Image (cartoon, rainbow, N blue to C red):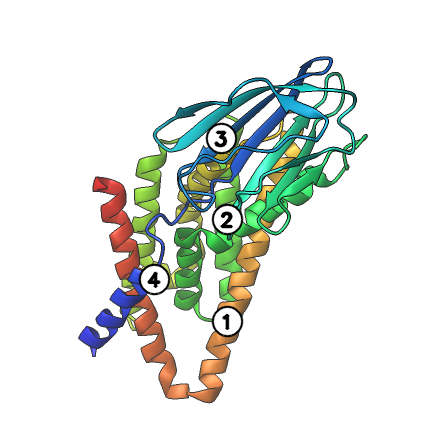
């Protein structure tokens, strides 16, 4: 039985992205340096969007680049720069990134001289933004809320930790208590790290996050053991939540925060993470309830399969992050 479950878990591993926490959007800065003279700067992660080929953002129709773009390849990203001349105002003009595909997205900041900064989020389905005469008040909040939600839903390591925690705790209110403790903890380290009060190197943090998932997977395989994790899941969730907060902060550092709107962006990102977490909790509890009703004897094998799949996946991440 164990060999059968392990084989299916290995297949599950093959389907899971190796880089579990790669929510690194394309970032673009379109800034006016002197009247009519703009600079276009961008950073493209080598993990996206869609390929490793350099993608050059497009500026409004009344603007033109001066010479060829300057591109510089780093270890994990391509850095680009263009000097741009604009004839007349840019309001109503569009900045676009047609190279976005799939789940990739981009953060665009437009900085007119002496006026408020405008922030936009570009996606594959909506790869262009229209520069407004006045920025929308809730634009930053909306964009960073969406990024936070996507980060928990598409960041496989955080997602698997929450899934394992729900499977371990099992019932409604204890799940809520454990999830609340996890939320409070990662919010503390996320805010403290983002504001510069503390911080850890990202590589060991990612390895320890993988180890935290392995820990919960092992606990799941011992159904009848009365361990600290089962007796006080909120305490374990809080401790590991502090660690995961450093991971969230690392992702937010890659994305960047808009100057002058750091509190709103930070709050929105954190609320987005919590919204994604609530979606995960509702989905897992709902699926478990369906299994209990349709196949009461199938719940234990299903949880056992999930524990092996989660454990093997996290073990792969641990080795990759330590030695890869």
Residue 218 is left or right of residue 162, and the answer is left
Q: Quick check: marks 1 and 3 in contact, CB under 8 Å?
A: no
Please state, as top left, top right, bottom left or bottom right, where the N terminus lies in the image: bottom left
The residue to which callout 4 is attached is 15
Q: Quadrant of residue 203?
A: top left
- Which numbered disc flags the more N-terminal residue, 2 or 4? 4
Q: Nearer the viewer, mark 2 or mark 1?
A: 2
Residue 238 is left or right of residue 65, and the answer is left
Q: Position of residue 121 (x, y in %)?
A: 63, 41
Residue extending farthest to the left is 3
Q: Position of residue 77 (x, y in %)?
A: 41, 32
The residue to which callout 3 is attached is 43
- Which numbered disc flags the more N-terminal residue, 2 or 1? 2
The residue to which callout 2 is attached is 151
Q: CA distance from mark 2 to mark 1?
A: 21 Å
- Which numbered disc flags the more N-terminal residue, 1 or 4? 4
Which of the labelled discs sits on residue 76, or is there none? none
């Amino acid at each position: 039985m164990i060999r059968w479950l392990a084989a299916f878990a290995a297949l599950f591993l093959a389907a899971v992205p190796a880089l579990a926490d790669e929510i690194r959007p394309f970032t673009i800065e379109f800034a006016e340096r002197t009247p009519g003279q703009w600079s276009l700067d961008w950073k493209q992660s080598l993990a996206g969007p869609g390929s490793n080929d350099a993608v050059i953002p497009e500026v409004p129709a009344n603007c033109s680049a001066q010479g060829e773009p300057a591109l510089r390849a780093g270890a994990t990203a391509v850095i680009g720069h263009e000097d741009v001349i604009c004839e007349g105002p840019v309001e109503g003009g569009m900045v676009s990134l047609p190279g976005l595909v799939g789940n990739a997205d981009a953060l665009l900041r437009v900085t007119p001289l002496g006026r408020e900064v405008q922030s936009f989020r570009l996606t594959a389905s909506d790869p262009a933004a229209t520069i407004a005469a006045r920025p929308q008040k809730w634009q930053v909040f909306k964009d960073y809320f969406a990024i936070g939600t996507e980060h928990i839903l598409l960041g496989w390591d955080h997602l698997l930790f929450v899934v394992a925690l729900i499977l371990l705790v099992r019932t409604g209110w204890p799940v809520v208590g454990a999830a609340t403790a996890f939320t409070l903890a990662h919010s503390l380290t996320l805010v403290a790290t983002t504001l510069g009060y503390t911080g850890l190197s990202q590589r060991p943090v990612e390895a320890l996050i993988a180890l935290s998932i392995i820990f919960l997977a092992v606990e799941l395989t011992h159904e009848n053991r009365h361990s600290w994790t089962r007796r006080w899941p909120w305490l374990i969730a809080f401790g590991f939540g502090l660690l995961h907060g450093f991971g969230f902060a690392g992702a937010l550092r890659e994305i960047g925060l808009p100057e002058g709107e750091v509190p709103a962006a930070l709050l929105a990102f954190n609320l987005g993470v919590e919204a994604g977490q609530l979606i995960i909790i509702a989905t897992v509890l709902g699926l478990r309830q369906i299994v209990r009703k349709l196949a009461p004897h199938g719940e234990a094998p299903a949880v056992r399969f999930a524990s092996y799949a989660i454990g093997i996946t996290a073990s792969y991440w641990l080795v990759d992050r330590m030695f890869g």
